[in-house]
Image (tube, rainbow, N blue to C red):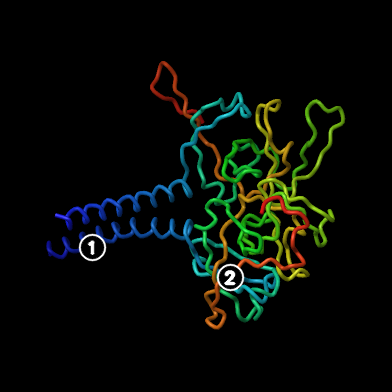
Amino acid sequence: MLRNALGKAFRFLGYTVQYGCIAHCAFEYLGGIVVCSGPSMEPTIQNSDIVFSESLSRHFYCIRKGDIVIVKSPNDPKSNICKRVIGLEGDKVCTSNPSDFLKSHSYVPKGHVWLEGDNLRNSTDSRCYGPVPYGLIRGRICLKIVFSTKMNGTIFV
Amino acid sequence: MAQAQGLGRRYIKAFFKGFFVAVPVTVTFLDRVACVARVEGASMQVFLEISFVYQEIKRCLFTDNSKPSLNPGGREASDVVLLNHWSIRNYDVQRGDIVSLVSPRNPEQKIIKRVIALEGDIIKTIGYKKKYVKVPHGHIWVEGDHHGHSFDSNAFGPVSLGLLHARATHILWPPQRWQKLQPMLPPERKPLHREQE
């Protein structure tokens, strides 16, 4: 009786570990579903939108200018931020605020990217904390899942 | 004939079943718990000498330019260290720890350095553009032990905690250098002011 119960418990544990590991590999090397919050990427991504992010681009180092990426926050490693890549290493970017009269420019250092939100008025991004190291990028957003009243679900690229 | 075919099919099924269990579990273990790596370079010379073991899976290159705490033998004898991912899952590092991180200048490379200062500390730099630096929130200051030959925070500034990869806990090879690596902060590199104790 006890042996039966122990056997079942171990089998259950084994399956949990196995599926947990498969889930980790999928999220780390393929991609996953992410819920975005905050107004900094409007109108492209609204508050509480569901998006799909893929991790292959980051592992093969083919993130391009204009991609929307999920990045570990430089000031808080436990939280993620979602911004658009405006400049890659070596690019010239404008570092001043839109309201400034005199614009200042700088070059993105090697191994870093310059991120900005689409909603420039309401976004803390590289204009605030500077260029972000490439190693902090988690994934690239490729799809947004939209639910409309007419259809059950639509996927927009 | 039919029996041989049945056996072959059973073997293939068993192989795939084993494959789909073993590969994810191994990869998750190497990513999240611990892995082994080889140190190359002179920046941690004397203390660490690391060897690559899972090079095929990760292509992870450590160029390490810290003090003579790693790689005293130089090119001929590289140290092998055990890298512990699990202990830094909450980004909980102490001053004096030897950690590996993704290089801020080259994301394909990993570097191994010693943590000198945590967020909020004020330290005196060696060869950095500012003489005194207060480490910003969410960042750490890392230095190699071999100051002349080290590509560390004195070159690229404070690094974000998100780039932390693992903590080096033991030297595994060569056997005469088996030891547990203790967090040791060189006394001349202590921060001038500590925010947290």
Front-most of residues A135 and B10: A135
Say what secondary structure mark 1 lies in.
Answer: helix
Front-most of residues A99 and B59: A99
Q: Quadrant of residue B68?
A: bottom right
At a point 43% along the width and 56% down the height, the residue shown is B28
Q: Image height check: is A107 above or below A143?
A: below
Q: Position of residue B59 (x, y in %)?
A: 55, 62
Between marks 2 and 1 in the image, the one whose residue lies nearer the viewer: 2
Q: Which mark is residue B43?
A: none
Chain ID of residue with mark 2 = B
Left or right of A26 in this view: B76 = right
Q: Position of residue B24 (x, y in %)?
A: 39, 55
Distance from disc 2 to disc 1, alpha carbons, whole Å, reads: 45 Å
Outermost residue toward the top? A150
Outermost residue toward the left? B2
Q: Position of residue B170 (x, y in %)?
A: 54, 71
Front-most of residues B28 and B67: B67
Chain ID of residue with mark 1 = B
Badge 2 is on which residue? Answer: B181
Q: Position of residue A124 (x, y in %)?
A: 68, 33
Q: Image height check: is B119 above or below A141?
A: below
Please identify the quadrant where the N terminus of chain A is shown: bottom left
Q: Amino acid at mark 1?
A: Tyr
Q: Quadrant of residue B129?
A: bottom right
Badge 1 is on which residue? Answer: B11
Left or right of A127 in this view: A23 = left
At a point 61% along the width and 62% down the height, the residue shown is B99
Q: Amino acid at mark 2?
A: Leu
At a point 48% along the width and 62% down the height, the residue shown is B34
Outermost residue toward the front? B197
Q: Badge 1, how many Cα within 10 Å: few under 14, some, many 20+?
A: few
